[in-house]
């Protein structure tokens, strides 16, 4: 039987999943239509891949958490946990890779550094993003066999197909580290480029303030807005891994349902929260979202009128 607090956290997690699907669905739809009408751009490809992977990630987080909490016996006594972990590795790695690609894209497009390495990267942005996809493929090729080996070893220990958590803490942490080596690589790369971009924007903003002529510079406002978006992204990114750490702690510490639910709720903040930050930070997405909301208002107000015209 779930407590009131656990029920509240589950309700919050479900609301987060709905918001995440709506936000990321809007991003994917807008840029997919844009790609159909025009040539597929690098940014469009990244955002479509990021939105789709995040929709899958949100549902996987919620589905896995609810099955853990509501039906643990069925969850552990079947092959569902094995299949979910395979899907988790693929979707989680893909989502982090697309997020890193987006950060690097903005870094190379917006940042202003005079170093020759940065200028060399800036001229080869498409190749660098293609290289990241190669790293994603290598990461999956290395990680998936490791996950398969973990489950096969566990089945051999138990002499049946029932999955049980019977490894010690050190072994479990070591396994998690091996599984997430690719994620750690992308996370490190993403944070480095985000901080470098923040430094570049801060330097530009400071320079514009020193040369201020008494009126508000639109360029300065745009750079301040970009810094706020990046800082928000970093905070959400860290929250995602804090939530993941809480879910891991569920297995290491005493199996506390509230700890698992809290981890699930915290992890789900990043995929839906960052999608709304992207919508507010992109004029095309912002205008489209306002148009959609306006259409809903019009439909709500004009529902009776429409019915009259139908008859």
Image (cartoon, rainbow, N blue to C red):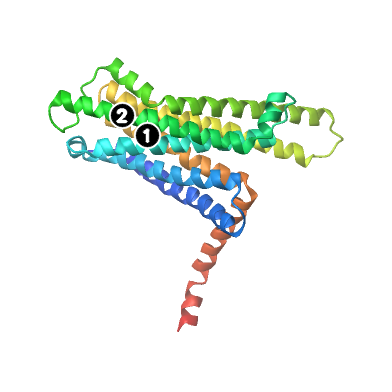
Residue 68 visible in the snapshot: no
Upstream in sequence: badge 1 or badge 2: 1
Residue 51 visible in the snapshot: yes
Residue 186: where, in percent of width, then height?
50, 29
- 116 or 2: nearer the eye? 116
Image-quadrant location for residue 33: bottom right
- Label of residue 89 in the image: 1
Q: Which residue sits at x=75%, y=30%?
A: 204
Image-quadrant location for residue 6: top left
- Quadrant of the image for the C terminus? bottom left
In this rendering, the answer to whether 159 lies above or below 110 is above
Q: Residues within 10 Å of mark 1 (few under 14, many from 20)?
A: some
In this rendering, the answer to whether 57 lies above or below 303 is above
Image-quadrant location for residue 151: top left
- Quadrant of the image for the N terminus? top left
Q: Are marks 1 and 2 in contact (CB under 8 Å)?
A: yes
For disc 2, the marked residue is 147
Residue 12: where, in percent of width, then height?
38, 42
Give the Cα distance between marks 1 and 2.
Answer: 9 Å
Q: Secondary structure at mark 2?
A: helix
């Amino acid at each position: 039987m779930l407590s009131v607090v656990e029920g509240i956290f589950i309700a919050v997690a479900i609301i987060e999943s709905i918001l995440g699907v709506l936000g990321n669905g809007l991003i994917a739809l807008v840029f997919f239509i844009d790609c159909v009408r025009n040539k597929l751009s690098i940014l469009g490809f990244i955002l479509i891949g990021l939105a789709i992977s995040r929709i899958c990630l949100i549902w996987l987080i919620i589905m896995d958490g609810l099955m853990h909490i509501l039906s643990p016996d069925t969850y552990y006594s079947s092959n569902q946990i094995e299949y979910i972990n395979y899907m988790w590795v693929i979707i989680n790695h893909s989502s982090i890779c697309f997020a890193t690609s987006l950060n690097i894209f903005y870094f190379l497009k917006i940042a202003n550094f005079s170093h020759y390495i940065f200028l060399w990267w800036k001229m080869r942005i498409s190749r660098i993003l293609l290289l990241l996809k190669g790293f994603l493929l290598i990461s999956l090729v290395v990680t998936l066999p490791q996950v398969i080996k973990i489950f096969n070893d566990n089945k051999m220990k138990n002499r049946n197909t029932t999955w049980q958590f019977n490894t010690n803490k050190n072994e479990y942490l070591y396994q998690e580290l091996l599984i997430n080596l690719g994620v750690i690589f992308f996370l490190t790369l993403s944070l480095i480029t985000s901080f470098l971009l923040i430094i570049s924007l801060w330097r530009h903003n400071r320079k514009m303030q020193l040369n201020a002529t008494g009126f508000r510079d639109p360029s300065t406002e745009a750079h301040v807005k970009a810094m706020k978006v990046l800082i928000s992204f970093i905070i959400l990114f860290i929250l995602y891994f804090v939530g993941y750490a809480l879910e891991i702690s569920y297995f290491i510490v005493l199996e506390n349902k509230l700890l698992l639910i809290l981890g699930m709720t915290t992890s789900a903040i990043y995929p839906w929260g960052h999608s709304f930050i992207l919508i507010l930070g992109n004029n095309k997405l912002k205008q489209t979202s306002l148009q959609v909301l306006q259409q809903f208002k019009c439909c709500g107000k004009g529902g009776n009128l429409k019915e009259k015209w139908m008859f």
